[in-house]
Image: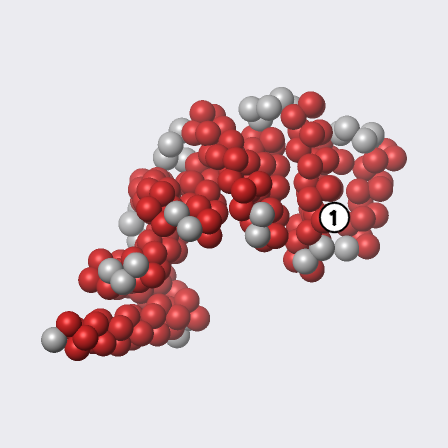
Amino acid sequence: SKASAAALAFDERNRGAKHAETANSAAHLADLYDAIGDFARAVRLRVRALAIYEEMQGPDHALTREALVGLSHTYTLMGEFALAEPIARRALLLSEKNNGRDHPFTAKSAGQLGEILLLKGDPEQALVLFRQALEANERSFGKKNPSVAALLGQIAAVFIDQGKYEMALPLLEQAHSIYTKVYGVAHIRTLNYAHGLGMLQAYRGQSEVALK
């Protein structure tokens, strides 16, 4: 973090307090503060970077959207979902406007907002956004891409939490198949999904016994 702080100080001296490179350095330093759990400093840096981008690049610029994504992420890490949600919604709307509904950036923003809503206790709206992200990534990367598998896993996890094991099973099987083909049977992601499938089969068995 010392090197990143030094880079920010360098940009401030040589490029100015409102330069895009200064904002970039502030955002990078915020990433490091997020990683060590110093969220108060991370928020200050992200708010600063966002203000620079909005003033210098404009409210609809791609860098502004990235700053919104970063700030929403930090608030989510803090558990401040009420603060994170409107920022994530703005990032999603901005990406839809600039890039279209099927762009990977839009899918990323939809997934981020879905995660926030899920943490807030709104699984149904989260599912809407996860499905939007899934469809966008399928169109952008094809149905055998790891980003598709990750979203299938997220949707399945919501169904599992709701006790909808029959709906979760084919999604987990599809995700496991993708990871197996892309990474091989011994990769950690493949193994994690294999374990998840085994656990789901056990849950289904317990539910069937309870219903008898």
Q: Can you say whether 139 is above or below 32 in the image?
A: above
Residue drawn at 77 percent across, 50 percent down: 4
Q: Quadrant of the C terminus?
A: bottom left
Residue drawn at 41 percent across, 35 percent down: 103
User: Which color scheme is applied?
Assistant: secondary structure
Q: In screen coordinates, is 88 left or right of 57?
A: left
Residue 40: x and y in percent read 72, 49
Q: Can you say whether 175 is above or below 112 in the image?
A: below
Q: How many labels does the image show?
A: 1
Residue 49 visible, this angle: yes
Residue picked out by circle 1: 41
Q: What element carries label 1?
A: helix
Looking at numbered disc 1 in the image, what kind of residue is underneath it?
Arg
Residue drawn at 20 percent across, 62 percent down: 166
Residue drawn at 81 percent across, 31 percent down: 17
Q: Which residue lies furthest to the right in this view?
A: 13
Where residue 22 sits, quadrant-wise, is top right
